[in-house]
């Protein structure tokens, strides 16, 4: 058995798969031991091909527990501030069909030549006047907040899509709702211009 006994091993595995993870989800994975956690992680891309962030509801769904909706909602936070920068790797991107990693030119560092799957996402620097963090937008929220659909973005291309994102979000006062992720990132579930 070459598994690391420490809980650090679980987080490393998650990051190795190219995912981000919510602290509650990490706690659940760690509590089940590394072997079982690896099993859950292995089935993650099949069950949630769109996801880049593992949330506790995902883990619970894989374990076939009914997610506690009320508990999930109370974990949601709201932040008010401005997006001051849109990071590289935002906009129209490609993902590896096997591991979901962000890839460029149909080449995955783990799986070599693959046929990339198009996706939309945003990673942005957010400043509320006191603190800064990185916001993560998955496809649905990106589509909603920029007013652009994935199919449309594919026609427009990477550069125009990124310009549309910047035009819609950069330096505007917004309120975002979502959850804090381990590592200080914030997963945006909802966005409102204020
Ligand atoms: Zn891959």
Image (cartoon, rainbow, N blue to C red):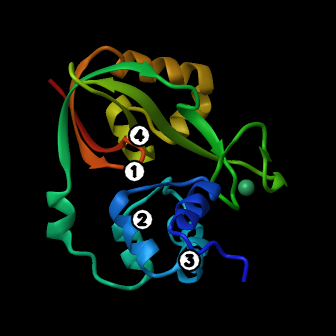
Q: What residue is shown with label 2?
A: 26
Give whichever of 73, 193 is nearer the camera.
Answer: 73
What is the x, y in percent for residue 19? 54, 54
What is the x, y in percent for residue 69? 19, 70
Of the numbered discs 1 and 2, the one sitting upstream in the chain is 2
Badge number at residue 182? 1
Of the numbered discs 2 and 3, the one sitting upstream in the chain is 2
Give whichever of 165, 28 is nearer the camera.
Answer: 28
Of the numbered discs 2 and 4, the one sitting upstream in the chain is 2
Q: Pointer 3: residues within 10 angstroms few (<14), some, or many (20+)?
A: many
Q: What residue is shown with label 3?
A: 34
The quarter of the image that holds ligand 1 is bottom right
Q: Residue at x 54, y 83 (%)?
A: 36
Q: Pointer 1: residues within 10 angstroms few (<14), some, or many (20+)?
A: some
Of the numbered discs 3 and 1, the one sitting upstream in the chain is 3
Viewer-nearest of discs 2 and 4:
2
**Is residue 147 placed above or below 65 in the rendered structure?**
above
Badge number at residue 136? 4
């Amino acid at each position: 058995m070459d598994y690391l006994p420490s809980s650090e091993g679980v987080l490393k595995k998650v990051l190795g798969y190219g995912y981000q993870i919510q602290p509650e989800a990490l706690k659940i994975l760690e509590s089940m031991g590394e072997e079982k956690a690896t099993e859950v992680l292995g089935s993650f891309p099949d069950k949630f091909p769109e996801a880049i962030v593992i949330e506790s509801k995902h883990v619970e769904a894989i374990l076939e527990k009914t997610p506690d909706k009320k508990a999930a909602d109370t974990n949601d936070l709201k932040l008010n501030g401005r997006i001051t920068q849109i990071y590289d790797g935002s906009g129209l991107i490609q993902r590896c069909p096997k591991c979901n990693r962000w890839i460029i030119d149909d080449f995955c560092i783990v799986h070599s030549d693959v046929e990339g799957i198009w996706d939309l996402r945003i990673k942005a620097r957010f400043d509320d006047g006191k603190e800064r963090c990185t916001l993560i937008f998955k496809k649905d929220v990106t589509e909603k907040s920029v007013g652009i659909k994935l199919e449309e973005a594919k026609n427009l291309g990477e550069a125009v899509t990124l310009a549309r994102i910047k035009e819609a979000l950069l330096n505007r006062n917004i309120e975002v709702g979502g959850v804090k992720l381990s590592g200080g990132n914030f997963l945006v579930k909802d966005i409102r211009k204020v």
